[in-house]
Amino acid sequence: MTSTRTCRMYRLIALAALLLSAPKLFASQQYSSSYGYSVDFPEGFYLEAKNDEGTAYQFASAVLPVSAILRVYENGRYPTAQEALDKTLDALGADGASECFDWRNSEAAVATFTISLNGKKCQGAGVASQLAFDAGTIVLFTWCEETKADQCWNYMLSLLDSLCIDRGSYFEAGPITAYAYPPSEEDTECTLTIDGKTFTTSMNASDREASEYLIEREFDVMCLYQTSVLWKEAWQRYYRMIFRDSYQRTKQAAFDIYNAISPDCADETDLAQKLLTWTQGMSYEREKTVSDFASIPSILQGGGSDCDSRSMLLFVLLRQMNVDSLMFVSAEYSHAIAGIVSSHPGHSYTVSGKQYLMGETTATGLTWGKVAQDQDDESKWIPIEPPLLYGQ
């Protein structure tokens, strides 16, 4: 799944006094029922201040010396997201430059800036976007001392990239990745053979590079928690961010795969079995990257993979096909497997009140519901679920 060094890292579970003593620590995925946005904060952020109207919040991290502000403006206050971002930063005396870009079928904005706070020069970045249903404009920005910027930059970008403004954005690249890697005008064709059927699908030519950027950035963030009591939550967020980024990039592939193999499937479990058998026959290769994780676009383009990237592939594709799926990872077993809700018999684990059959992606010939006997301790498996939509 991951390198030996990486797997060992997650066994170093030590008490982190700073995290334990931080006030008002909250779960990472935060929502607003009034405005429809959410932010999947890196673990360890806490609320420092807010206004009575619920339109302005200031946060700080107990992990790195990073602060953030979230501001919502009523509909019509600013004609564009870029102006809202510029005016907010101007009011704080920040110097920087903003740029508009397309995200979620509307104009969004991104900025980098410097600002002097308490006699110290700070560096930061921000994003802004119109909210759905004319709910207003959201501005989210974050900063740290300039001397800490190299250490904190990916952490801050990860925070900004976790912003969701409507239901669709839970399944699409975040604003930072969308800005840095806009869609190409060209597509890349991929030839797949599944269940004896060979067919062609496609994805955008920018998808692989964009996905690999997000994976390496999020791995850098996850490594910050290697000795933290929040290591498990950070690991879940890492894969959750990959799922979100990969979903839209694989939409065409999921559609073409389903059309090619579903006519010969008895039920959803049979469909899932054909995909499981396909992944079991893939070339097992380790990525020559820091994260050691193969992006989903690279796998579909014929690249090598190992257990966590294959499990993520099934997780994403089956969700596209309306099959209730997830993945499990284990530090103790240094392994990952997929899971599906099914009425078929077999080994299963309970997550959120549902029974998920286990799926081994690297050992050939195994069906759903079969797992190695020396890896069947449910307490040692961590479930990776998709991002939670508001109201779930």
Image (tube, rainbow, N blue to C red):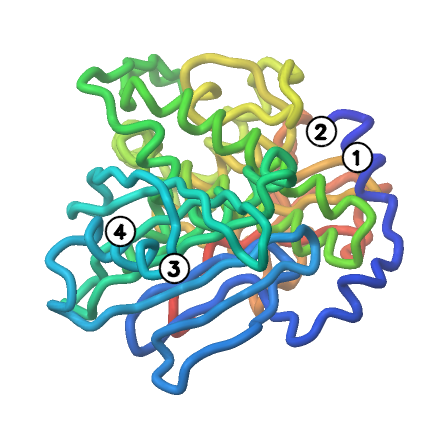
- Labels 2 and 4: the sequence-earlier one: 2
Asked whether 280 or 116 is in front, the reply is 116
Distance between the alpha carbons at the discs numbered 1 and 2: 6 Å
Q: Is residue 343 visible?
A: no
Distance between the alpha carbons at the discs numbered 2 and 3: 43 Å
Residue where numbered disc 1 is placed: 7
- Labels 1 and 3: the sequence-earlier one: 1
Q: Nearer the viewer, mark 4 or mark 3?
A: 3
In the displayed structure, does residue 217 sit left or right of residue 362? left
Distance between the alpha carbons at the discs numbered 1 and 3: 43 Å
Q: Element at badge 4?
A: helix
Q: Is residue 310 visible?
A: yes
- Is disc 4 in contact with disc 1, using a CB cutoff of under 8 Å? no
Residue where numbered disc 4 is placed: 86
Tell me the number on the disc at residue 92: 3
Q: Residue at x 45, y 54 (%)?
A: 324
Residue where numbered disc 2 is placed: 2
Q: Element at badge 3?
A: loop
Q: Element at badge 2?
A: loop
In the displayed structure, does residue 173 sit left or right of residue 377? left
Q: Nearer the viewer, mark 2 or mark 3?
A: 3
